[in-house]
Structure formats: C-alpha cells, structure tokens
Amino acid sequence: MKAWRAALLRFDEDGAPVYEDDGFLLVGPGAHGGQVVRAAGSWQALAAQYPGVAVEHLPGRILAPGFIDLHVHFPQTDVIGSPADGLLPWLEKYTFPHEARFADPAYASAVAQVFLDELLRHGVTTPLTFATSHPASVDALMAEAQRRGLRLIAGKVLQDRHSPDGVRDETEQSLADTEALIRKWHGQGRLGYAITPRFAPSCTDAQLRGAGELAAKYPDTWIQSHVAENKDEIRWARELFPDARSYLAVYDGFGLMRDRAIYAHCIHFDDDDRRLMKSTGAAAAVSPTSNLFLGSGFFDYEGAMRVGFRFGLASDVGGGTSFNPFHTMLAAYYVGREGQTKPGVSLAPGHLWWQHTAGAAAALGLDGVIGNLQPGCEADFLVLDPHATPLLSRKVTHARDLDELLFSLIVLGDDRVVETVVVDGAPVERLPHRSR
C-alpha cells in the first residue's frame, strides 16, 4: 500500500464536496484486483493507523478524483476548431470526411494515441467515447486504452442511412460487427462497450431495432447517442419518425432507454421528455462548449433538477472546443446562468466539479467505482497544483472558503494545474506542453 498527504477533495453520498486541508489518501489492492482507495480523510485522524506505509508528502497540492468525460468523439480529435454554420453543415464539411479515414487501422491507432494523451494531460481518466462506423477504429482505441490500463467505454457508430460513402455502414453487418466487438472488448480489464447509434436520423428502423435487441441481450453494456441538440435536426427526426411523440421517444420505442444509456445534449426537451429520462434511468451528457460553439442552445439545468433525471459534463470534442475540464465547467456555469428559463441557475462550484466526477460516474451507473476518492473507489486521481500560474496562485491564496478555491480553479485553471495523473494507483508519465 502507498499513501499521499496533501489537501483532499471528494464527495459525500449527496454529491456535496468534502475537503480536507491536510488530507490522507491510502491506496492498495482491491478485492477484485486493481488498486483502490483504502482510506481517505484527515491526516490527523488516519495517519497513525497505518504505520510503516510509504507516504508521499505533497505540500500545497490537492488530491482530486480523475475527471470523467461523458461524451467525446475520439475520431474528431483533429476536427476541433473547424468553423461551420451549425451542426449539420459541420458534420458534412468536416466530420464525415475525416471519419472516413478511420477505416485504416494504422491511422486509427495513431490518432488513438494522441487522443488518450490529450485526455490524460487534461486530467480525464475515464471517457465515454464514440469511435467511427469502422470496427478497426474500436479495436485501435480499445487496444491503446488497455495498454495504458485505462477505464474507457467506447463503441462502433451505427449509421446505415443519410450518411456519405466512407462512413455509411450496412444494416445487418453493422449489428453483427457490434456484437462481435461486445464479445471481444466488453469487460476486458477496465474496458466497456457502448452500443452507439450515431443519432436517430442516421439509422433505419431495422438498425435501431437491432441495436435495441443487442442492448437487451447485453444489459451491462452502455448505450450512447445524440438527441435534441439542434432544431433542424429535431425537425428532421420528426419527419423520419412521425409516429413518435418526440425525438427522444424514438429511442424509447426501440428499447434504447435504460440504465447506462447516455444521451448527449438533451437541450430542446419538454417535461414529458424529462420524465422519460427519469423513469428509464437514462442520463444526459451536458456538452456546453459544443452547444455554444455550434449555436445549438442551452441545456436547461432548472428543468433537469426540477424533474430529477441524471446528468453529467462532457467535452464533445470535436464540436466541443476543449479537452480541458476546467473550460467545460466554466462553460456549464455560463449555460446555467443563461438557461431556458429566467432567472437562470447559478451552479455552485462544488456542483460543477461533481458533474465532471462523481455525478458523471452516477450517470454511467459507476457511482462508488470511479469519480470519487471514497474508500472502495478505483485509484484514478489527480495531483493538482493551485499555484500553477501567477494569477491563479494569487487568487487561491486569498480564497476565503472552498467555493472560492474551486471556482478560482474553474475560471483560471488549465492543463498546467494537472501536475500528476494517477491511473490504477500508478502515476502516468507527464506529457510535455508542446505540439506534436
């Protein structure tokens, strides 16, 4: 076993932040393999209980859970920062042509390395990510994540219509490929599989029906897709599925809403949609930088909290503009202020942080497993340097309480704050701040 002494951030069962100025974190082997948190709390209360355990002292640093990205596109790593008039033109001009290149296993493997490097450099230790429609893209990403010992969930995109050559797949083969990939990767080490219809307009009824059948056959897999992101997309979905009450209800009709189902965006909802999310156990991946960049709209935090369905934060790279969780949390703060109802919601700094860690874990059905530093959680955590930049250092020095400390990091922080990333109890080699 090994211990760390530094300030310590974690969350209680109600999602409230718990902070120790002088904390103690003990990591050791778990009952089912891997490294887990064995004890967490104040140094004064715990240290004497573990004599002889090696301790790494990190004065001035903060130990915090690794971030969870609930929705990110691995093959869009090089699409980030591409200008367009909106979602659908952006897909046609940049995304689909680039994703066609992932039929090449060597290309997919090279991008997978860069993608995971970027996530880790920014402190993301668990992503839920889209691959492309090519099985080779899933194989490349899963193999690279497995080599690094990462917890990662990914899936082959399903899109058998309204998609250009190079990314459009064939219905029966796409479902057979999906099942083969589930059997190959799901549950291997720390890997999980997500059944991944791109979005309802890109899938025939037969493909969505087959996806729902796979979701029922493999109930511990995840499901991921997009919904209610853009008003033009919503009109299109209604034309294609005229019998569905709403865009979201399309997925429910095909058996694609349940626990472990994550839907990105969920912007243009009514209360019936919100109640459907809650009753089925599905969760929303809130993607504020993407929604702001593409002009899609604002996630309605007030509506989500009033009805009570689950949600967490996501970068949505490449529509999203940053891998950086601090930027994502700040954008979520802006979105909460704007909202879809007036007055908006002022999201507390601890709640923003929870959305990107323990709250995202709960959305995935992995609460108590990742996203926290309570005993029993997997040992994926960060060593943060709140003095990484001069202005941030000045600001946190004068912080009067935890809210001010966390908000200073959200507003002024970037990847320089992430001093060390620990995955499964082992520090990851620090990646330099340089272009490749």
Image (cartoon, helix red, strand yellow):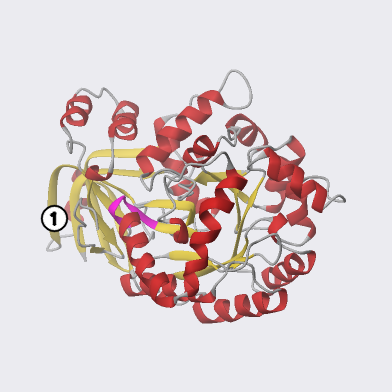
Residue type at numbered disc 1: Glu
Residue 198 image position (x, y, % from top left): 62, 59
- Is residue 398 rendered to the left or right of residue 145? left
Specify the quadrant that holds the N terminus.
bottom left
Q: In front here: 82 or 179?
A: 82
On whether residue 123 falls in the magenta region, the answer is yes
- How dense is the environment of label 1, judged by Cα within 10 Å: few (below 14), some, or many (20 and up)? few
11 over 300 or under it: above or below: below
Q: In front here: 281 or 252?
A: 252
Q: Quadrant of residue 52?
A: bottom left
Name which residue lies at 51% across and 24% down.
337
Q: Check disc 1 and report the residue beneath it.
A: 56
Specify the quadrant that holds the C terminus.
bottom left
Name which residue lies at 42% across and 49% down.
80
- Is residue 37 rendered to the left or right of residue 56? right
Q: In front here: 187 or 225?
A: 225
Q: In front here: 420 or 173?
A: 173
Residue 18 image position (x, y, % from top left): 35, 39
State which region is magenta: 120-125
Answer whether residue 131 is visible to the viewer in this image: no
Residue 91 image position (x, y, % from top left): 57, 51
On whether residue 255 falls in the magenta region, the answer is no
Name which residue lies at 51% across and 35% down.
292
- Is residue 158 rendered to the left or right of residue 140? right
